[in-house]
Amino acid sequence: MSIKIALLLILLGSLLFSAGGPPMMTDGTGTPGNGNWELNIAYKGEYPDVSSRYEAPSMDLNYGVGDTIQLKAETSYIQLTHEDETKDNGIGNAKIGVKWRFYEEDMLSFSVYPQYSFAPIKKNLDNGLADIEEAFYFPVQMNKQFNSIAVTAELGYLAVAHDKNYLNSGFLIGYRYTDKVELLAELYRSVQTNGNDEFITFMVDSLMP
């Protein structure tokens, strides 16, 4: 089992209250609204052993179609330092998706969010900048609001081409500290369907729209 702990800072964001989404791993049920654009830009870093991997930046662009549908495009610029201290940089994986919030009543909502990931630059699969050739992810999200607290949960199946498949689950709690500051805490688990490999990530963040 691998455990990662990350502290993330949003440089530019326009997320709904505890709706989830980048830079958090758990997605929520929120959508931008009809005709509205939403851009989230974040910097992320991983430091396993002597190597390092930066997503600098990670960009997530969304567009609202009606009040309940969201179109998504996402990619990252990767800066990678290998164990032998050689370096590579360039575009990592890209992702496109469509979210549909199919239920919303009494501060409770549900959505589905099918997404397709791919490597737009095939040679970056060889140097590690892109880590997935092709994958399809089908998650279901739930969001429940309790005054200043919101809870978001996600359960999804990740099918990876030429590799193992994963079952992902995420749990996100958001607390609105003030009208302009929200505190987020997230626990995310990804496990191979054969049970051989498991990754658990804990993240904390602050959101200032």
Image (tube, grey):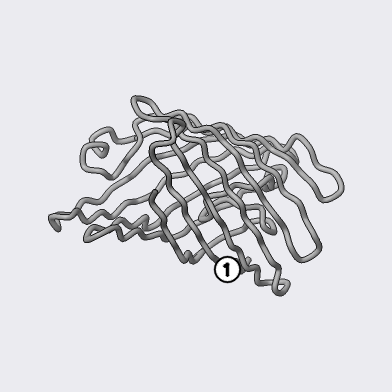
**Residue 67 location (% of width, % of height):** 75, 41
Q: Quadrant of residue 6?
A: bottom left
Quarter of the image with the C terminus is bottom right
Q: Is residue 120 found left or right of 150 in the rendered image? A: left
Q: In this view, does 143 lie above or below 9?
A: above
Q: Name the residue under label 1.
A: 206
| Dot 1 crowding, Cα within 10 Å, few <14, some 14–19, many 20+ | some
Q: Which of 189 and 89 is in front in this view?
A: 189
Q: Quadrant of residue 114?
A: top right
Residue lying at the far right in this picture: please name it: 106
How many numbered discs, if any?
1
Assign a secondary structure to mark 1: strand
**Residue 179 location (% of width, % of height):** 73, 72
Determine the residue positioned at 51% across, 36% down: 167
Q: Is residue 121 found left or right of 152 in the rendered image? A: left
Determine the residue positioned at 42% across, 44% down: 198
Determine the residue positioned at 60% across, 66% down: 207
Q: In which quarter of the image is residue 123?
A: top left
Residue lying at the far top in this picture: please name it: 162
Q: Which amino acid does label 1 sit on?
A: Ser
**Residue 170 location (% of width, % of height):** 58, 48
Determine the residue positioned at 35% across, 58% down: 46
Q: Nearer the viewer, residue 123 or 46?
A: 46
Q: Is residue 92 above or below residue 39?
A: above
Q: Is residue 6 above or below residue 181?
A: above
**Residue 176 location (% of width, % of height):** 71, 68
